[in-house]
Amino acid sequence: MDRYLMISADCHAGPRPAEIRPYLDAAWLDAYDAWLADEPGQARHRAEHIGAPLFAEEAVDEFQEEAAGGMDGAWDSARRLRELDADGVVAEVIFPNSPLPFDVGLMTYQYAQDPGRWRAGVLAYNRWLADFCAETPGRRAGVGLITIDDIDETVRQVRWLRERDVFGGILLPGSAGVVEGQHAYNHPDYEPLWDVCEELGMPVHTHSGWTPNYGDFSSSVGIFLSEITWWAHRPFWFLVWAGVFERHPRMRFVMSEQKADWMIPTLKLLDSRYELPMFRQLRHTLPLKPSDYYRRQVFIGASFMDEGEWDTRHELGIDKLMWGSDYPHLEGCWPNTQATLQKIFKDVETRDVSRMLGETAAEVYGFDIDRLRPLADQLGPPLESIGA
Amino acid sequence: MDRYLMISADCHAGPRPAEIRPYLDAAWLDAYDAWLADEPGQARHRAEHIGAPLFAEEAVDEFQEEAAGGMDGAWDSARRLRELDADGVVAEVIFPNSPLPFDVGLMTYQYAQDPGRWRAGVLAYNRWLADFCAETPGRRAGVGLITIDDIDETVRQVRWLRERDVFGGILLPGSAGVVEGQHAYNHPDYEPLWDVCEELGMPVHTHSGWTPNYGDFSSSVGIFLSEITWWAHRPFWFLVWAGVFERHPRMRFVMSEQKADWMIPTLKLLDSRYELPMFRQLRHTLPLKPSDYYRRQVFIGASFMDEGEWDTRHELGIDKLMWGSDYPHLEGCWPNTQATLQKIFKDVETRDVSRMLGETAAEVYGFDIDRLRPLADQLGPPLESIGA
């Protein structure tokens, strides 16, 4: 084993608009076509969200050039395989790419203004993703979408995902507790969801992307960038205090593409509240302190982190951190993955690099290492090329 | 000058329910009496907010005993003076104490469900506070409440406060951008508010207390404690990105009772977004980076901080930090102020202690040092008793 076995714990995929049609329930096709045709309506919703385009035009042009055409690997399976192979990545965890039908997915928007549309978009994407993952057996683990306005339906969705055998977990909508009609994650009505995820070994994810609307102003992009990770962190302490980790010790919780530098200060804050005599009533409901639940069952899909962030890997737990390329997104390291890894891991021991680049993800998502090893021996970067 | 001149930049005051009646507009007296009598309704609103009592019963009992009767200084002016004198505090900045009429103030609740009631409560409290401050000339600076659903009315409120000559600023409601009908602070409609605060030299405050509702669950207290400071931080980056600091270079912004440990990481985050090539469009609207606006016009009403937090005083700016006792609240340092200060400042030079304990607050709030000095010479703790 003289090459790394690289698994990206954070990639994105989604079909082009026409390709989702066969996956939509027939009853929703007309509504979907109308939604697709209503470009001003879609644009208005997006403008309300963060106002202006997220990326500077020059940065987009530069990326298009570097990436030889950009994000087509989001839907083109053959191209995706070629690009990930060239990147040295033998397996990946797949989150949604935007836009998806009726704007379901990571970023946008105030879903569930129409629960039927929301569900139709979610089911269609999950079906598409099941097929997309099945094209390369053992190399793709999808993270399925769920709706949360009807818990029985949610549980059915999780069971459906598990039966497909190509999903590595579910994604919690970020909108819970903010959008009318969606309880925050401390609500007891969610108990069947945590039950089924624990029972079926489905990791529960949050991923940066969802935020409230900031209005159609030039300031909104800056505000979005200032709090986008916080909205993804937020369910963590809702689950801690609601005793979800206490009651579901085998449920795994993964926090993806939202950095890791916030975790230690946040655990310190939560523990310090828990331990303060004036709040000692918190201890009546939770026998362990918040950081104990973190250590027992939380993982960080760290994606790109700053150089200094990896230095905290032992405090965070070396088995907690999973690197991700964020392929095929502009803000990720692809197509400069090798150079990026050489830079961020230059002082990190090979043993630690190996865990963060793949071993932990293999364990969390159940990838079959024996099956992937031969591929890694061909594609993976040489051990001596990354790390200290 | 061998004693510290101590100004608490964070204290709380508010009348008992019957005492506010003379300050309410007559048209609202019946509604107020009905609201007061509706204890189940009030309890329900509070329960929806953070569910259970904030403090452990034993902690409340212990505080009552230590404080010889507890929080009566919130409304009893003579008692307050005696207690602050004994604490060594010669002047103070006053934020609201809960509950106030129609639940206006810091913590609760979803105000502006009825804009008329909200305004009636705000005006009554401001009138009461003006009289309360005037009882000890030069020693009390009130922070006035405002409503934000009608900007012309807001501007009139700020002008009224300035004319009273006993107010040290205004408090921004934390509910903006969350509660229906209240724009977030990046909305251009607020421009007249920033204009008038800059024109009149009225510092603009946020203070921890407001959060969204977490529901009537035992988990809600933990969630409240996990994010209460964040909701107070939040307007800072709304104002940064909206260019409010850029357009109002003389407007001062004070962030009270929300700790300081978050500020350096937050400035690093905001600056790093600002400087990333892929977001270079942010620089088109703001000539300075976020940390420059902080340095130019933001102050921290630090209240109680952890020992380590004061170690960052030079990075934060030694002229940025203002200590506060949080009198008469249980979570503050009173009635153990001297012992607390000895502990947290044990390695801090006298010069720095002096700034953080009073000099910066005197400057920000315009307290007359010459007038307060003789009092400090009697009441203030000896220089050698606190600091290194």
Image: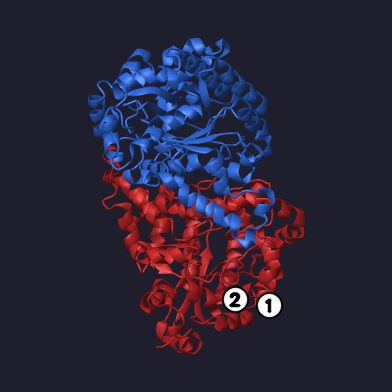
Chain colours: A blue, B red
Disc count in the image? 2
In the rendered image, residue A6, in percent from the top left (x then y), is placed at 37, 27
Kind of residue indicated by mark 1:
Ala
Instruction: Name the N-terminal-most of marks 2 and 1.
Output: 1
Q: Are marks 2 and 1 in contact (CB under 8 Å)?
A: yes
Quick one: A27 or B130, which is closer to the camera? A27
Element assignment for label 1: loop
The residue that appears at 45% across and 53% down in the rendered structure is B235
- Residue named by callout 2: B335
Q: Chain of mark 1?
A: B
Q: Chain of mark 2?
A: B
User: In which quadrant of the rendered image does the C terminus of chain B lie?
Assistant: bottom left
- Residue named by callout 1: B68
Q: Is residue A234 above or below residue A42?
A: below
> Horizontally, is B189 left or right of A194 in the view?
left
Q: Is residue A267 above or below residue B129?
A: above
Q: Is residue A308 visible?
A: yes
